[in-house]
Image (spheres, rainbow, N blue to C red):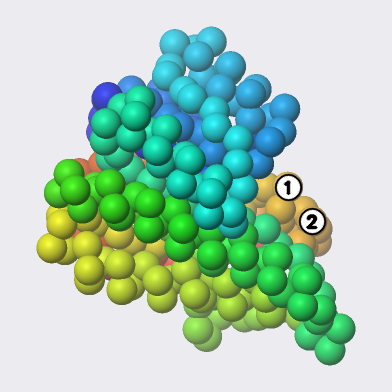
Amino acid sequence: MSMKDRVVIITGASRGTGRATAELFAKHGAQVVLFSRPSPHLQEVEAEIKRKGGRALAIAGDISREEDVEALFQKVRSLYGHLDVLINNAGIVMKRPFVEMDIATWDQVLDTNLRGTFLCCRGAFQMMAAQQQGVIINLSSLSGVKGVEKFPGMSAYNVSKAGIASLTEILAVEGKAYNIRVCVVSPGAVATEMLQQAAPHLKADMTPQNLAEILLFLSDDSGRMFNGSNIELFTNA
């Protein structure tokens, strides 16, 4: 597999799965664009990739803000002229029993996870439609998959992740006319800081690096048969 000279946007790239994915894609020759909220970690990832001989550009912004996302894609268009892959990884989890659910919490989770994914998909879709090719990979969760065990306090998160899977399904249909491939990955427990915050009792077998390898496979031509697929990753915890 090779990402040589491919332009790849990775959201939530300052830590966890996003960071591992950025480092792996850069190692395989991609020009990675790291998009995340302002954080010292974001510059650290950019510097580490460059130190190892890779190519990276860090752009700070909030995926739930339309103006930030538009600025991201305008920057990519002006610098590189094209976009090959979008990895929609950014997301948050906020636990709240539904009987205590407040509008602010609900909106914050849905705005980041679902609205943010929509905004980034729209920006990528417009660029990729014009160039008649591209790959979009969204990150959902088993929490958004029907029939999988659910946990109290996760209503906003579950709804946001189910929405991402549904958005992916229709984008895969609409993308066919433009040679845009879209799929979604729904992992279970992954050993990240987010998991520790949401469910500290869980000990995940899957690491961010394991998940990054799957995302690399799907982004490459090797993953071309997975258009529209929701790839559910069950791991021991």
Using the image as rendered, state which of residue 64 and residue 22 is in the foreground.
Answer: 64
Asked whether the viewer can see residue 208, the reply is no
Residue at (79%, 56%) from the top-left corner? 197
Q: Secondary structure at mark 2?
A: helix
Within-10-Å neighbours for mark 1: few <14, some 14–19, many 20+: few
The quadrant the C terminus occupies is bottom right
- In the shown orientation, is residue 163 left or right of residue 135? right
Residue 28 disc label: none
* Image position of 116 with respect to 153: above or below: above
Q: What is the quadrant of residue 165 in the picture?
A: bottom left
What quarter of the picture does the N terminus occupy? top left
Q: Residue 58 appears at what percent x and percent y?
A: 54, 28
Judged left or right of residue 90, residue 164 is left
Query: Residue 54 appears in which quarter of the rendering?
Result: top left
Q: CA distance from mark 1 to mark 2?
A: 6 Å
Q: Amino acid at mark 2?
A: Gln
Which residue ends up furthest to the right in the rendered image?
100
Task: Please name whichever residue, 165 or 152, is drawn nearer the observer in this view of the structure.
Answer: 165
Above or below, 98 against 206 in this view is below
- Residue at left offset 59%, top offset 25%: 45
Pointer 1 residue: 193
Residue 89: x percent and y percent?
Answer: 52, 51
Q: Which mark is residue 197?
A: 2
Q: Quadrant of residue 31?
A: top left
